[in-house]
Image: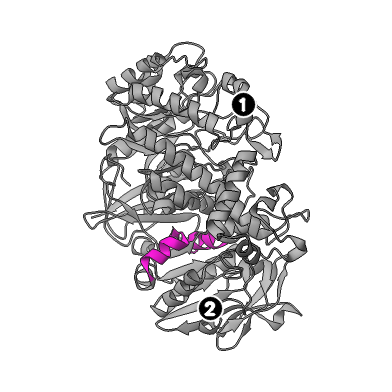
Amino acid sequence: MHLDRSGILFGAAYYAEYHQSDRVDQDLDLMKQAGFTVIRVGESVWSTWEPRDGEFDLEWLQPVLDGAHARGIAVVLGTPTYAVPPWLQTAYPEIAADVRTGEPMPWGARQEVDYSHPAFRFHAERVIRAVVGRYASHPAVIGYQVDNEPGMVLFHNRGSFQRFVRRLAARYGDVETLNREWGLTYWSHRLSDFSDLWTPDGNSLPQYDLAWRRYQAELTTEFIAWQAEIVREYSTPGQFVTTCIAYPRPALDDEKLVEALDVTAGNPYYAMQDHLDATKDLAAVTPWTTSGVPAMFRQADRLFSSNQARFLVTETDAQSIGGSEFNLPPYPGQLAQAAFAFVSRGAAMIEYWHWHTLPYGTETYWGGILPHSLEPGRVYRELAAVGADFAAIGDLLDGYEPDADVAILWSNDSRFALEFFPTFPTATGQPDRTSYTRIFDAYYRGVIDGGAQARVLHPDQALARGAKDLAARFPVLIAAGFYVATDSQLDLLREYAAAGGHLIVGIRTGYGDEEARARVSVAPARLTDAAGVSYEEFSNLRDPLPVTSEQGLALTDGAAATLWADGLVPSDADTLVRYAHPRFGDFAAVTSREHGDGRITVVGTVPSAELAADLVRWAAPANVADAIAPERALPVTVSSGSLPDGRRAWFVFNWSGEPQAFTPAVDLADAVTAEELSAGTEISLPAWSTRCLVGR
């Protein structure tokens, strides 16, 4: 995986074809003045590229690419396969994605197609070859985005289902093995032949659902890899191939998806205004926009996690993003904060959705850099200032690697399983399909609120490192909600602690095996003896439950158990925290025990923000950011990373509307202005501001 570019790429998605008049030169001049160095084009308009079956119009993009190149603006060229033209829909209605068996997704939006269907693949390949073949040699083109945010729909089409059955037969070998592994004796589901398998619409078995979700993610991976292979027949040396990932998509395994790509790219969207106040706790506004500073950083760290490497932000907020009813434009300074936040966690490109706000269509109120008037306004001016800052930083961040005091495991299989069998109810008593993310985010927020930084690891990435390397690189490892886990993955956690790491085990970890079967063993499975604790009872918590400190772990006001309580029974572990409750007080809420050269701490609840931060401060009492701002406190946060020359880059944020200040403990230089800042000199942080600094 590589990105053969220097400096931070900065720009926007640009669709000249969406304008009602020709203003390419005017737009590109404005971009140049704002310090833009890259645009993304072409991925949304198959019907413009191929207005009728087999009839191509390829020349309309030439002025955009020529104009961009003349101004030193690079281009990422997209393949238009996520939005199919009407003529293809009407000629081949069978390519529509069935959202349930026999129920095709209605036309009229986008991504309505089963991209595993041979008829779709035929036409998709033809337009890919036409577009990429026409422009691959253009000097402006530095890379390609294949498709757009894939994995939105779980395909229930007959052909997709039959391929699923064939893959089950190949994996399990015979139907009796499948019967045994899935427990199909239950409710008389035993199969006499693979052809007996029922369609997923009415399925109630978690083992079936996990296999189905894995298969759907495989279809997405195969589709993107197929496109990448075609594009590479035309690409020239130095051009990269990627796709833009929307991480909440249901048919997506990001770790596997990026294996066929040169660089990870994704679309982190977040709510702005008071949602970025680190002293406030506001609910998310939409299912695909995060709320809060930790959740925004989590999106960036998830992007890094896919390949454990720097990444591209292909779309993010310019103004309000999310429909006519969702209007939260950024406070002054927040756009710069978000841009530097992503860069601080490894972004090598920041692109906005999109250049100009559209006067028509579904996304009429998805704000671009230019408002409906197309006159440059505050957002344009603020982003121009960001462009100037990036230009001043230049190639300083080439080879940058973000720091991490704590590693947190992210498990796509566990996400799939807990979406089918949620751990929590919603406020109205329905299954909460976001249960896995809620568990994960509780700990991720604890890392940020506790003053530390995180690295997100997939289980197989951790396994590939091995226990000793993992313990040497990450002194604290959190495994929470890790429900679908193999024996070897759980053994790695135990061995990590023995090698000197501090393992923090959260709820549901190890409760299921690789088939999402509840393990027939004392919980936490394969960790009980090493952790010196077990449990057999667990309960949902309707309201937060106060907790008390027993020993060694200082608690702040607001520390509480939320959502869930494991009844932890220590055998050879210290009780650090206990539930303050007449029944649950019989159990420990948090225990800890030395194991080998390290320690295993078991947390039997979803910690409140305060308790999570307390746990992180206790487990990681000294962290990287202490070197620059040991006295910092929210709303001030620090993100950092190492440079190839041995220095460290620091990003200091004030996530509030009130001025703040910090006093650095080391000599620094401002990466933008080159101003030298001596240790012990107070540095002001105006409202919603960021400083990018480098060690001297």
Q: Magenta stretch: dominant SS?
A: helix
Q: Locate residue 543, reporting x and y percent.
A: 73, 64
The foreground one among 599 and 245 is 245
The foreground one among 150 and 408 is 150
**Residue under the image location 67 percent in, 81 percent down:** 587
Q: Please, what is the three-letter code of the amino acid marked with disc 1? A: Thr
Above/below status of 41 relative to 527: above
Residue highlighted by disc 2: 527
**Looking at the rendering, which quadrant does residue 515 occupy?**
bottom right
The foreground one among 352 and 658 is 352
Q: Locate residue 377, reporting x and y percent.
A: 48, 25
Q: Locate residue 260, reporting x and y percent.
A: 39, 45
**Looking at the rendering, which quadrant does residue 605 occupy?**
bottom right
Q: Please, what is the three-letter code of the amino acid marked with disc 2? A: Leu
The foreground one among 194 and 485 is 194
Above/below status of 230 relative to 25: below
Q: Residues within 10 Å of mark 1 (few under 14, many from 20)?
A: few
| Residue lying at the far top of the rendered structure | 21
Residue highlighted by disc 1: 362
Gap in angstroms between the C-alphas marked 2 and 1: 51 Å
Q: Residues within 10 Å of mark 2 (few under 14, many from 20)?
A: many
The range drawn in magenta is 441-466
Above/below status of 154 relative to 169: above
Q: Is-magenta flag for residue 65? A: no
Above/below status of 228 relative to 22: below
